[in-house]
Amino acid sequence: MPKYSFSCASVGMNCGFEIVNADSEEELLEMLKIHAKSSHGVTSIPPELLAKIKQNIKKAGKYSFSCASVGMNCGFEIVNADSEEELLDELMVHAKMSHNLSSIPPDTLNKIKQNIKVM
């Protein structure tokens, strides 16, 4: 199971507060609501800040992906990458060498990101 982490500094707050190893995004957000209220006086997190927070939540675990999960019939898989970034970098090498792509189209990249597994 992936673990979830977040730091206030990642959204520009001058605050050293961090949450590490939460079991779910929901658990992390509940803990963050308590911190926001007690330390920052925020009783309700505005939608734009919540979106920024969600973009900065980090998942820890091993990342894997299979081209078959997005309809490619090449048999390529990546398993046990340490981060989504590492997985996407390696996938780009595969896309260039095996599929002659100089870049991954944005719609395909979104589909890929939706099919990345974190264990």
Image (tube, rainbow, N blue to C red):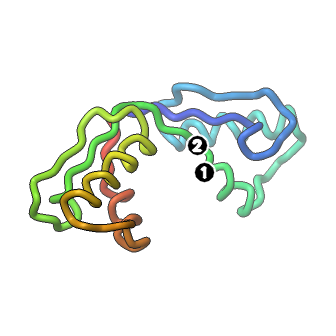
The location of residue 76, given as percent across then percent down, is 15, 51
The location of residue 117, given as percent across then percent down, is 31, 45
Report if residue 31 is visible in the image: yes
Residue type indicated by callout 1: Lys
| Gap in angstroms between the C-alphas marked 1 and 2 | 5 Å
Instruction: Say whether residue 34 is left or right of residue 60.
Output: right
- Tell me the SS state at disc 1: helix
Q: Residue at x 39, y 64 (%)?
A: 109
Relative to 55, does residue 107 appear above or below in the rendering? Answer: below
Relative to 106, does residue 39 appear above or below in the rendering? Answer: above
Q: Which residue is mark 1?
A: 54
Instruction: Say whether residue 16 is left or right of residue 72.
Output: right
Residue type indicated by callout 2: Ile
Report if residue 1 is visible in the image: no
Quadrant (top left, top right, bottom left, bottom right) of the N terminus: top left
Instruction: Say whether residue 1 is left or right of residue 100.
Output: right
Q: Which residue is mark 2?
A: 57
Relative to 54, does residue 9 appear above or below in the rendering? Answer: above
Q: Residue at x 77, y 59 (%)?
A: 46
- Tell me the SS state at disc 2: loop
The location of residue 63, given as percent across then percent down, is 33, 39
Quadrant (top left, top right, bottom left, bottom right) of the C terminus: top left
Q: Nearer the viewer, residue 35 or 99?
A: 99
Q: Residue at x 67, y 49 (%)?
A: 53
Q: Residues within 10 Å of mark 2 (few under 14, many from 20)?
A: some
Q: Residue at x 76, y 33 (%)?
A: 35
Q: Are dots 1 and 2 in contact, CB under 8 Å? A: yes
Give residue 27's quadrant in the image: top right
